[in-house]
Amino acid sequence: MRSTLETLVSQALAALPAGLLSDELRSLPPELERTRDLSHGDYATNVALRHAKAARQNPRQLASMIVALLPADPAVAKVDIAGPGFINFHLTPAAYHAELESLLDLAANYGRKAAHSGEKILLEFVSANPTGPLHVGHGRHAAYGAALANLLVAAGHTVSREFYINDAGRQVDILAVSIWIRYLERLEELVPFPTNGYRGEYLLPIAASLEASVHHALRHPAAAVLIGLPPDEPQGGNKDTYIDALILRARELLGVDGFEQVIKHSLAGMLSDIREDLAEMGVTFDRWYSEKALTTTGAIDEALRRLDTHHHTYRKDGALWFRAQSFGDDEDRVVERENGARTYFASDIAYHLDKRLRGFDQLIDVLGADHHGYVARVRAGLQAMGEPPDCLEVVLLQLVNLHRGGEKIAMGKREGNFVTLRQLRHEVGNDACRFYYVMRSHDQQLDFDLELAKTRSAENPVFYIQYAHARVASILRQLADRGLSYDATVGRRSLPLLIEAHERRLIVAITRYPEVLELAAATRAPHALVNYLRELATDFHGAYAAGNENPAYRTIIDDEALRNGRITLALAAQQVLRNGLSMLGVSAPETM
């Protein structure tokens, strides 16, 4: 319905006298919003206020000119001017009834735009270091990224979901040596576990599978491992120095192939667990992209070649530097160390260049809040390599705080005392996880209340919304129990009979869905859809309660026409609730 009004306003702007507005201003899409008070109409636009200065007109005078030039349309009952120059549109009941019928015809496709009508987007999210199981913080990234992908697809974009595997670098070496020490323990070679190693029990099954795979092939005496190593903490040493020395010793004893075998086995075990965890949560990816592949495919070489060709690199102290400051970063960045090793930054810009070379218009990265300095430097790299810097958009997600019984749960990954995503899902269920993770804006910290998430009451928002969906199914079962049936044809024909205030509110709420989808996708805000579904559920429960208070408002009544009309309205609400929950990755049960 809003698109119809936008077209009418655009036609009126085009018909204004020549010279009043520039062609550029006439072509700007008019902004129409739902009114907060239905007595002021259904939609309002501030187009006259926006253009009054350019037109050298009083806003109300310009509004009057626009209203006079509006083409007639059967969906519009009345147009009036309010306040300093707002134009309010009152729609006919028939316009809303037609929208409800369109909703029921389109069903799951209601509110969705045609595919390929938008940009081609690569959405990267989660991308957790494969050094441990996913924890509750990763869960927010998974739920947010999956919901955002669904919203972008609904908005007409082509979306590819990608997980970037950080399978190169020191953290992977620490993971491998941690598992190797656990493997040696199984063979009764007792090496003190490094303070800076990964201590979680999740390593034990991987160490066991390594033993089953290689038997004693990677075994070395504990004395050979420990000889000459510096002290660890807290024995007067430095934990970083010790773990680096232990990694070097493992490489010496196992050789290049042996240590790589441990790395591959460790990564395979961790990635298998991560994939399974996400799949169980309903989160899938189109591609799992290996950081190591950037080297093997020559992607980093290509990125550095581009920088060098445009004279954006220089040598200093034996290292190769990128002139990042020339592109808005706060300092220049090393891309190759004096020993020839490429930096994480070199990998990052090579990865994003590769995304562009794969044909994606927009690159959206969903990252943790501690990556705020990441945006400027990667955009600088893209610009220096000849790509538009604004093709990269970074969404920063704030932390998750887990609460039980009013107490905050402390977590630390390296020590292994964190709550895993799998544990959380098993306790509260996938639906609560997917819903609660997107209930707040991404730029706000999220307090996840375990006890509330498990509550089967109106205080639990996911239960409250699902219950509204199930209530409609219950109405249909009650109808059958009374020997009655639903006639869709009669129901659609009887929509004009729905004249009660609570019915009008519900109709208006239902038909807001396409606009909410569009807004949530454009602003990268799944929580906007959550808020809408809660409001829609409130309106539906309110209409249901009206029937309990006044028998004349009940759905299952003797009047066949009114009964079928009310059931049609309930089914429309149910369809939108189901569509919205599906966008969020939450089920829509028939019974509760």
Image (cartoon, rainbow, N blue to C red):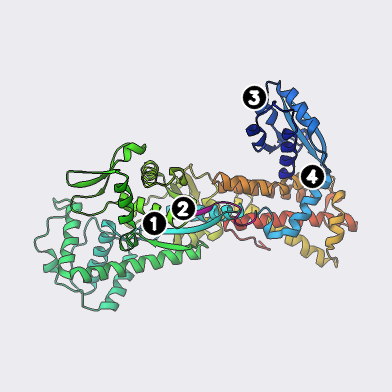
State the quadrant of the N terminus.
top right
- Mark 2 to mark 4: distance in Å? 38 Å
Q: Give the range drawn in magenta.
A: 114-123
Q: Quadrant of residue 256?
A: bottom left
**Which is more toward the observer, 380 or 477?**
380
Q: How far apart are the two marked residues, 2 and 1, measured between alpha carbons?
A: 9 Å
Q: Nearer the viewer, residue 439 or 491?
A: 491
Of badges 4 and 1, nearer the viewer stands 1
Q: Position of residue 488 (x, y in %)?
A: 83, 61
Q: Residue furthest toward the right?
A: 559
Distance between the alpha carbons at the discs numbered 3 and 1? 51 Å
Does 255 sit left or right of 547 as displayed? Answer: left
Type of residue at label 4?
Arg
Residue 116 on the magenta segment: yes
The image quarter in which residue 158 lies: bottom right
The crowd level at tag 2 (other Cα within 10 Å; few <14, some 14-19, many 20+) is many
Mark 2 to mark 3 CA distance (whole Å): 45 Å
Circle 3: element type: helix
- Residue bearing mark 4: 504
Earlier along the polypeptide chain: callout 4 or callout 3? 3
| Relative depth, front residue between 183 and 279 | 279
| Secondary-structure class at tag 2 | helix
Number of the label disc, if any, that sits on residue 128:
1
Callout 2 touching callout 4 (CB < 8 Å): no
Which element type, helix, strand or loop, lies under badge 1? loop
Which amino acid is tagged 1? Ala
Residue assigned mark 2: 141
Determine which residue is flagged by label 3: 54
Q: In which quarter of the image is residue 355?
A: bottom left
Q: Where is residue 474 in the image (x, y as percent from the top left)?
A: 74, 61
